[in-house]
Amino acid sequence: MAPVDIQIGRAPNLDGALLGDTDPATQGGYPDHPPRMGFFTDTSVCIGCKACEVACKTWNAIPEDGLVFTGMSMDNSQGLGASTWRHVAFIEQRKPIDAQDPGVQHAGGSPPAIPPDAPGASGALPSDSEQSSEFRWLMASDVCKHCTHAACLDVCPTGSLFRTEFGTVVVQEDICNGCGYCIPACPYGVIDQRKEDGRAWKCTLCYDRLSVGQEPACAKNCPTNSIQFGPLDELRERADARLARLHEAGVADARLYGRDPHDGVGGDGAFFLLLDEPEVYGLPPDPVVTTRDLPSMWKHVAAAAATLVGGALAAFVAGRRL
Amino acid sequence: MSEQQVSKSSSDVTENGLRGVRSDRDAVTGVATGKPAKLGKRRGGQRDGAPTVPDAEFTSYYNLPVINKPVWSSPDIPGYLFLGGLAGAASLLGAGAQATGRPALGRVSKAGAFGAGVLSLVGLVHDLGRPARFLNMLRVFKVTSPMSVGSWILSGYVPLAGIAAASSLFGKAPRIGMAATAGTALLGPAVVSYTAALISDTAVPAWHDGYPEMPFVFVGSGATAAAGLGLLAAPVTQNGPSRAMAVFGVGTELAAFERMERRIGMTAEPYSQGRGGGYVRAGKILSKFGLAGALLGRRSRVLSAVSGAALMAASAATRWGIFHAGMQSATDPKYTVVPQRERLRAAAATAGPAPG
């Protein structure tokens, strides 16, 4: 099945394509398709090893992306771009780290239950001064979100960007003419132009590996399973369970980002568990696919065009006296 | 241990712990976050000096932009916006001139429309990362992509404008010329206005947030430019409609711009600050000056021409200003984060007070 033909033949259905919770592969013209695949990146177990960055570069043969020393903690790759498809963020914070039970009690059996009237029992967790500290380090591996409603895909004028049968979004590099429209369209700052070759590049969710039943290189290489790959439905369940566990353990800051299929982009194919506000990680707090407003934009364009015609007619009526 | 070696380090490890540790090594963690970072070559780094208003309170990742800045360059893209506006509006003026028997204004407008249309297309193609693949724009038609719609509009419009201009200049094939002129008058308003949807249909805050008014700014700016071209190159006796068009163009542009800036609030800052703000201000001044000259100097060929040039420059300045203001709003994470935070806060407030 050639995605190119689908793009040519399909009459766009704006309502379904631009809003709400839909199945992107079906919307993209695959009546019969494998389950939607994605990433769940659990940043609470990320150790900042950058194995994902390296694996991605190696597998996808991505060129060098700037050898610079930024002084931004351990982060020298700075953000996602044409030649950085996984990016590990490092945030140093003067915030007390939530006390966490390391689960290594040696006294045998389960840890003693905290009596309900004990200090700290009602709050977030045992306020054990030995386990909390005034410093924490957040690490998170960012990646293309493979949005349900992908602005990059919507605005691409060549059909170079397309929806795969796995519900992911991929650039066909033999089609892309480097118009650059996808770049400011992306609400997350993912896709970018590779200056030396002029075309736009981003994460493919390892489309080549998926096609032969392999998991993407980054997930394969993640030593802590911070990057989890699988059918999106399953990942969402897993993430919900993980979030509940973290909340139970007193990590009140934990939250899912991009999990909600009713958010501004219809949910992300690659979503995250974060330990602080999204903007701390360089993510937009409430991204909305820009094409959600496109029907209204076209209406305003039509009204303005009509105004111009009216203005020109009036100019010729009034012009007799001017 | 020699004296020289000892002097390399000011601290000693002793039985009682560290001695002589310099206090400035006591680095405070987390101070770098949210402050302007010295950027590498890849991203931005072009923040020009200190902000002129106090930054709104927000967090960001080392003050790096959230979205990727457009790779569109100047003069290609602002030129493409300006010339498209000039072309489309000039087609209306040309068609009207033909219908009302103003042959000189007709020739000027039709030739100008064709020239500007071609140059607009050249700007677009030149800006492509792979110009040789321009025709890939015509592989698909997508209403979700204003650039796709625009490419189709332009590919219909430019040949028609060429036929209309040639027929008018050489006085050949009047019927075909008239049909082509009618065609350009139909497509012209679309050529002027679609670029507003094109820049608004992005995550660039200053462009996206202004989407309801942007098409009106663009048609006003286009009408101003076309009126300017008429005043610059056609005789004063035929330029009544150009003067009226200048009134319409400047009025529409200024009113829509004013409304947009007032409505979008913080995201409008780049329209009055920095490089973008400079161009926008220049545009406003030039358009008022040009309009006054066009109306007061209606009997003077020289004054009309100067006013016409000022109006065209005004239109160009506005486009350059909008272009650079968008770039500024994309580069500063404030414009992405703060409005989104406010939206979330407002949504939470309407959803009722948080439990507990």
Image (spheres, coloured by chain):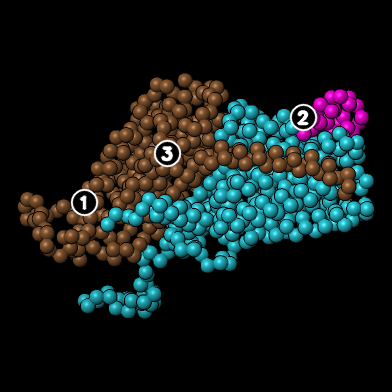
Chain colours: A brown, B cyan
Q: Residue at x 9, y 51 (%)?
A: A110
Q: Residue at x 12, y 63 (%)?
A: A118
The residue to which callout 1 is attached is A248
The residue to which callout 2 is attached is B183
Q: Position of residue A252 (x, y in %)?
A: 27, 55
Is the Cβ of the residue at disc 1 closer than 8 Å to that at disc 2? no
Q: Chain of mark 2?
A: B
Q: Amino acid at mark 2?
A: Gly
A62 relative position to B275: left or right: left
Residue A284's disc number: none
Q: Residue at x 45, y 28 (%)?
A: A27
Question: Looking at this view, is A14 or A275 the one in front?
Answer: A14
Q: Amino acid at mark 1?
A: Glu
Q: Which residues are magenta?
A: B161-185
Q: Chain of mark 1?
A: A
The residue to which callout 3 is attached is A266
Residue at the extreme left:
A108
Local packing at callout 2 (Cα closer than 10 Å; few below 14, some 14-19, many 20+) is: some
Q: Residue at x 51, y 64 (%)?
A: B55
Q: Position of residue A86 (x, y in %)?
A: 42, 44
Q: Position of residue A269 (x, y in %)?
A: 39, 37
Q: Residue A308: which quarter of the image?
A: top right
Q: Position of residue A290 (x, y in %)?
A: 52, 42
